[in-house]
């Protein structure tokens, strides 16, 4: 026993010597530390859960980065982890050090009860294979004449009343569910045609519940397995049943062969690749998750060319994605000891040592609101900023390429980004043609709230103020919906 302990100590000393040599070789310095008030950083978890309950989690993250630094070290349940909103660091994690240095860590285990094995949870050869299966689905040829959207936008518009409040967030969820199932599965579920449909409503609720559990598992890192239970299992089962039923309907369809001739159907391609029904469902559910959250014209003559000429519309959508990125927070785990290129030292410009197994969270939401990238009015919605050639974002190539990242970047950049932008643009134009005047409807409670942020520089809490309520699962949505009145 004593000999075993001595061997472990020897290995540990060897690792430390190796890390110190690596640190000196690359001139690494420590990133500024987010101060904890309780042992093991338990207070960090409590702050996150309270902020999430109050629907102001992103404001908490923005406060920490502005208070401590754009790259920071933190202790979370006794484990050292890092956070960053530096474009150069994102480029390293997502691109230049993509192969070999950074991976998903525990993501597969955390996601598995809901998503199983699919493009979101896979790495290496399996991920590359899934991506190649999906790539033809989003070729421009698939939606060149916009007909894949037209029927479902018609259904969306038919659900909008005049002079009465309507929650657009719920309608757009159904709209993207309808278009996504149409293009991925070859047949739409047509949830907008039957707003009272229990199946679609239950799927939406259970999908949301399952994602809520998954993101809570993420926050516990190595202790993710504490989060689960009957409600989580039932929500996952409900989601799986919904997708299984769609798959079976496709198999039973008499027009499957005709559909294959007309255009590429992802379901058919995956079905040819595997006969395992669970694997088939996992792949489809992974893609469906991305498609549903990708989207938060002249009538029949509207086409892609028309949309491409609408530069202000493009800026509006770009500004929306800046302030409300679909996936506001993401993570990577170091496969081997490496470094982030910036964030360390007194002036926070030196490399930061990242040890094997360290977790790094990157917050797109906070990066997109940096005043040194987007100007003093970075918190404001101003589409015109994208016409400004002197926008600080464009100060260098790395910042310009990695400082605006609503669709991720590098080899895992979202394949469906152009499809999603076209879908959103088409829907917006068609709605405005029908309803040129709209206004925000009153909501049931104040969106503004005050709270205390605990700074690394002050012993007492700092009074902070949030202007909106945001619901966080794997993605972000308006906490109280998007109630609008169309005239």
Image (cartoon, rainbow, N blue to C red):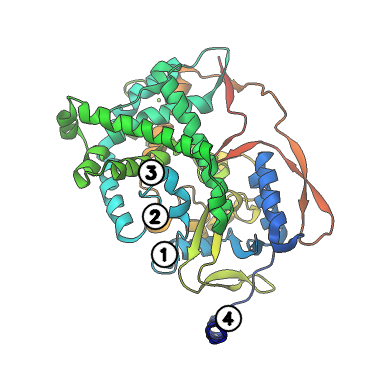
Work out which residue is located at the far right of the displayed protein and give it: 460
Element on which disc 4 rests: loop
| Element carrying mark 2 | helix
Chain-order first, disc 2 or disc 3: 3
Q: To which quarter of the image does residue 348 belong? A: bottom right
Q: Which residue shows up at 65% across the image and 45% down it?
A: 57
Residue shown at the point (22%, 41%) measured from the top left: 271
- Which residue was labeled with disc 1? 98
Of the 4 image quadrants, the one containing the C terminus is top right
Badges 2 and 3: C-beta atoms under 8 Å apart? no
Badges 1 and 3: C-beta atoms under 8 Å apart? Answer: no
Q: CA distance from mark 4 to mark 1?
A: 22 Å
Question: Can you see residue 486?
Answer: yes
Q: Which of pointers 1 and 3 lies earlier in the amino acid sequence?
A: 1
- Spatial CA span between label 2 and label 4: 30 Å
The answer to whether the residue labelled 1 contacts the one labelled 2, judged by CB atoms less than 8 Å apart, is yes
Q: Residue at x 58, y 27 (%)?
A: 482
Residue 191, image x, y percentages: 40, 22
Disc on the earlier residue, 4 or 1 = 4
77 sits to left or right of 88: right
What numbered label is drawn on residue 109?
Answer: none
In the picture of the structure, the residue carrying the numbered disc 3 is 286
- Which residue extends farthest front? 1
What is the x, y in percent for residue 235?
A: 47, 35
| Element marked by disc 3 | helix
Measure how far apart labels 3 and 4 are at the Cα level. 41 Å
């Amino acid at each position: 026993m004593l000999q075993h302990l001595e061997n472990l100590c020897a290995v540990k000393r060897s690792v430390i010597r190796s890390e110190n040599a690596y640190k000196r070789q690359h001139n690494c310095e420590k990133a500024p530390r987010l101060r904890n008030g309780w042992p093991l950083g338990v207070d960090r978890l409590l702050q996150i859960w309270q902020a999430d309950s109050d629907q102001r989690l992103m404001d908490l993250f923005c406060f920490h980065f502005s208070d401590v630094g754009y790259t920071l070290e933190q202790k979370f349940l006794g484990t050292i982890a890092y956070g960053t909103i530096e474009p150069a660091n994102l480029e390293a994690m997502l691109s230049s050090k993509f192969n070999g240095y950074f991976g998903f860590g525990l993501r597969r285990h955390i996601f598995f009860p809901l998503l199983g094995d699919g493009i979101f949870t896979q790495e290496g050869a399996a991920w590359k294979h899934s991506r190649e299966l999906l790539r033809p689905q989003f070729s421009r040829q698939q939606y060149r004449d916009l007909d894949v959207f037209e029927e479902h936008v018609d259904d969306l518009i038919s659900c909008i009343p005049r002079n009465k409040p309507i929650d657009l967030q719920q309608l757009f969820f159904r709209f993207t569910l309808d278009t996504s199932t149409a293009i991925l599965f070859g047949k739409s579920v047509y949830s907008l045609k039957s707003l009272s449909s229990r199946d679609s409503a239950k799927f939406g609720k259970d999908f949301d519940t399952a994602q809520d559990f998954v993101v809570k598992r993420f926050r516990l890192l190595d202790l993710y397995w504490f989060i689960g239970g009957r409600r989580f299992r039932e929500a996952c089962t409900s989601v799986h049943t919904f997708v299984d039923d769609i798959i079976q309907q496709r198999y039973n369809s008499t027009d499957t062969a005709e559909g294959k001739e007309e255009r590429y159907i992802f379901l058919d391609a995956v079905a040819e690749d595997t006969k395992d029904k669970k694997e088939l469902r996992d792949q489809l559910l992974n893609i469906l998750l991305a498609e549903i959250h990708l989207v938060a014209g002249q009538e029949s003559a509207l086409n892609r060319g028309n949309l491409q000429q609408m530069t202000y519309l493009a800026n509006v959508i770009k500004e929306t994605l800046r302030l409300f990125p679909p996936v506001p927070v993401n993570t990577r785990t170091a496969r081997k000891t490496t470094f982030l290129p910036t964030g360390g030292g007194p002036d926070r410009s030196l490399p930061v040592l990242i040890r094997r197994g360290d977790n790094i969270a990157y917050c797109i939401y906070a990066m997109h609101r940096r005043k040194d990238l987007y100007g003093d009015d970075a918190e404001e919605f101003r589409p015109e900023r994208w016409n400004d050639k002197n926008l600080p974002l464009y100060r260098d190539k790395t910042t310009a390429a990695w400082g605006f990242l609503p669709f991720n970047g590098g080899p895992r950049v979202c394949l469906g980004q152009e499809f999603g932008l076209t879908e959103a643009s088409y829907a917006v134009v068609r709605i405005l043609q029908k309803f040129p005047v709209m206004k925000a409807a009153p909501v049931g409670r104040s969106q503004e709230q005050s709270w205390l942020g605990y700074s690394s520089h002050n012993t007492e809490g700092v009074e902070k103020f949030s202007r909106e309520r945001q619901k966080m699962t794997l993605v972000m949505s308006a906490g109280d919906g998007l109630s609008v009145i169309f005239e």
